[in-house]
Image: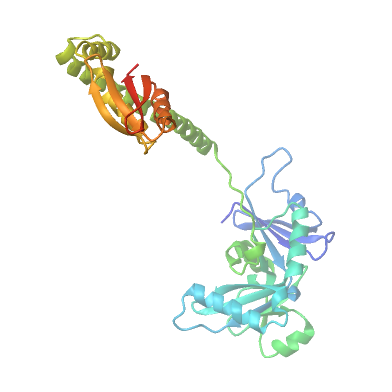
Amino acid sequence: MDQHLLLTAFPATHDEALYWWHVADGAVRAWGCDPDPLTAAQIYGPDEPPADIRMVALVPSHLTSIMGHEPIEGATPSQALAAAALAAKARSLESDQVHIVSAMDGADGMVTAAIARDVLGSGLVHLQARNIDPDAITPSGWLLPVAGDDAVSADFGFDRVLRAGNLIATDDPALRDILFADRMILPVTGDDFDAMMTGAAQKTDLNFRSGPFAKKTQRIIEPLQKRRLGWMLVALVLVTFAIPLVQLAKYHHAASKADEAALASAATVVGEQDDPEGAERALDQRLIDENRGNIMFPVPASALYSALQQVPNVSVTRMAYGENGIVAATLSAVRNEDINPALIAIQEAGFIITAVPRTDATGSAQADITVRAP
């Protein structure tokens, strides 16, 4: 049981005084009728922190319609409750205007309660205006005990109720004669009434606070949870920075290994070197000394053939290669204008060329050229 339980009447207007009961430690500590039940109950003083209060609003019997339903063989509890709510909606003359809830009644039976949506909505607004946001809204007659074949009655101040099984109605003389004429009516008063109010927290299964009228839950973060979230955020930041740092360290290690392997490989050709840049310079000089590198035949020759691919009307009739790295060739075409694009392409590739145009015995245009790498 909650430490504090505040029971209030469900209001029909914004300014009416509401009956209320304050239950604490298993007993009714105070009760009364006041426009501001929360203040009147004096659950906590002005200088005290708010107590843990469970709030339940009791709806007068004339605002609700309660109906019992027969058990459904083979259905699960959730299926049975859904079927009962659908049956109650089908029997309602204004099914679109009512809010229906269901609960199990005993082992197999079901019971439903219906209330007009506008009444429920406006009453909830009136309660919240008084700083009361009830955890449950239940018919007042649902609190009454079941007395076998007899009926029971109770006077809540704002509502006089009769109950016999699932038959719950306003205690009106005419209804007594019609609905309860053959039953003994046992009043719930004094200590029995207080005991009924004390156990109200366990009788809120028929709760109108569901669906669109469900209470909005507020999640409270405790100081320990805040500290944990703070440490988790710090850990997330550290991991976020650690991942790229670890990757950078791995890349640095891999690059160092590659440099060591490159120096070891270059040492077999140019001897020991201090760093990869020095090894590269030594290898370039070695290639130059051996007439290799950029002055090797494939370098200028590949530039020449790449240029000729752009001008299909030009052909090579002669090619020679000298030890100085110069490729000499004769280009042939129908006109000199056809050869010029090839020469321009070689120059744009960064190679140094010379060209001497001439005409052969057949009248074809030819050009004796030399190509040298820079």
Residue visible at 30% across and 23% down in the picture: 300
Rendered position, 199 above or below 169:
above
Measured as percent of width and height from the top left, residue 99 is found at 68, 71
Q: 195 or 137: nearer the eye?
A: 137
Measured as percent of width and height from the top left, residue 19 is found at 76, 62
Measured as percent of width and height from the top left, residue 137 is found at 67, 64
Q: Quadrant of the N terminus?
A: bottom right
Rendered position, 308 above or below 50:
above
Say whether residue 270 is left or right of residue 300: left
Q: Quadrant of residue 129?
A: bottom right
Rendered position, 356 above or below 195:
above
How is the protein colored in the picture? rainbow
Q: Is residue 98 visible?
A: yes
Say whether residue 333 is left or right of residue 96: left
Q: Which residue in the rendered view is the most extreme toward the left?
A: 268
Q: Which residue in the rendered view is the most extreme toward the right?
A: 15
Q: Quadrant of residue 282?
A: top left
Q: 304 or 320: nearer the eye?
A: 320
Q: 122 or 266: nearer the eye?
A: 266
Say whether residue 234 is left or right of residue 351: right
Residue visible at 63% across and 57% down in the picture: 27
Q: Is residue 165 visible?
A: no
Q: For the image shown, how many numbered marks are present on the structure?
A: 0
Q: Quadrant of residue 247?
A: top left
Q: Quadrant of the C terminus?
A: top left
Q: 172 or 229: nearer the eye?
A: 229
Residue visible at 74% across and 40% down in the picture: 46
Measured as percent of width and height from the top left, residue 96 is found at 70, 75
